[in-house]
Amino acid sequence: MGNVLYIDKPSGMTSFDLCYKLRPVLHTRRIGHTGTLDPLATGVMVILYEKATKANQFLVSANKSYHARVKLGIKTDTLDIEGNIIEHGSFTVPEKQRIIEALDSFLGDSKQIVPLTSAIRVDGKRLYQYQQENREVELPVRDISIYSISLNNTYEDGFSFDTTVSSGTYIRALARDVLEKLDLIGCVSELRRTAIDDIAIEQCNTLEDVMKGNYVSHDLYEILSKKYETIDYPDPEIIRNGKKILVDSVQDQILIVHEEEVLAIYEKEGDAYRCQRGLW
């Protein structure tokens, strides 16, 4: 058994709530995740516990895939169906080709205004705290990439789409911008994360199965060796002491292991490599 768990997060709980619920089942207090999902959202979450929590920074930058459904005619302060309604409007569901063209216009690199309800910090305070205090704040702008986006279906009250995006992209904000392109108001009514890089929803444990102790976990070697060039170093004590090493590699970062035991991430410094983070 490893220290990494792929789980299909249910709707109605925060990412923190999920981790808190998993603590007694996984017999640990050291637990975290590689990417937050809103309470409304379901789908793939990567849970790290025990020593795997040390590797968080090396796992968070990943592409993510989503299925989103948009409800037309109402606008909320959170950009999703769970927020306070701030505007109503009449609508006609656009023709499929018009929606496709609007979605396609977001392909590639662009900038995105971060939603006010996000947890991004501005001047030491999270954005949602400014909203709670009814204070104005300049919203940050992020560089994002939309790798794929396609219309899934249309409905009497809206449409759904599938997309793969860079880490840090807000799907609620993407839906907001698509709706502006269509001259409509609406909000996200369903959101499901279907993949993180090559981790698909089909690989995930359900919360119900995990609570019953019936789950599959993964180890760091299995995951990190797919992302980094892996060097099996013969003397693990040198690594545990954080000493610089000389190895035959040209990569900026490498994974150091000993007989498939993960020891550290090392980064290039001149002709040598120095320890960036111990993972033993």
Image (cartoon, grey):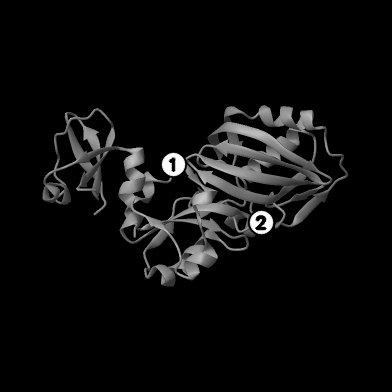
Q: Is residue 77 above or below residue 165?
A: below
- Please say whether residue 241 is visible from this viewpoint: yes
Real-space Cα distance between discs 2 and 1?
32 Å
Q: Regarding mark 2 in the picture, which secondary structure is present there? A: loop
Q: Is residue 279 above or below residue 233?
A: below
Question: Where residue 213 is drawn, which disc sits there?
Answer: none
Q: Residue drawn 16% across and 33% down?
A: 247
- State the image coordinates of residue 116 (x, y, percent, origin top left): 62, 49
Q: Is residue 145 above or below residue 257?
A: above
- Please say whether residue 133 is visible from this viewpoint: no
Q: Regarding mark 1 in the picture, which secondary structure is present there? A: loop
Q: Nearer the viewer, residue 137 or 142?
A: 142
- State the image coordinates of residue 77 (x, y, percent, origin top left): 71, 52
13 left or right of 100? left
Q: Residues within 10 Å of mark 1 (few under 14, many from 20)?
A: some
130 left or right of 56? right
Quarter that holds the N terminus: bottom left
Quarter that holds the C terminus: bottom left
Q: Amino acid at mark 1?
A: Ser
Q: Nearer the viewer, residue 194 or 74?
A: 194
Q: Residue drawn 34% across and 47% down?
A: 222
Q: Residue drawn 53% across and 64% down?
A: 207
Question: Where residue 134 is drawn, which disc sits there?
Answer: 2
- State the image coordinates of residue 167 (x, y, percent, origin top left): 50, 41
- State the image coordinates of residue 26 (x, y, percent, origin top left): 40, 67
Give the labeled residue for mark 1.
61
Q: Nearer the viewer, residue 248 or 53?
A: 248
Which numbered disc flags the more N-terminal residue, 2 or 1? 1
Q: Amino acid at mark 2?
A: Asn
Q: Residues within 10 Å of mark 2 (few under 14, many from 20)?
A: few
73 left or right of 275? right
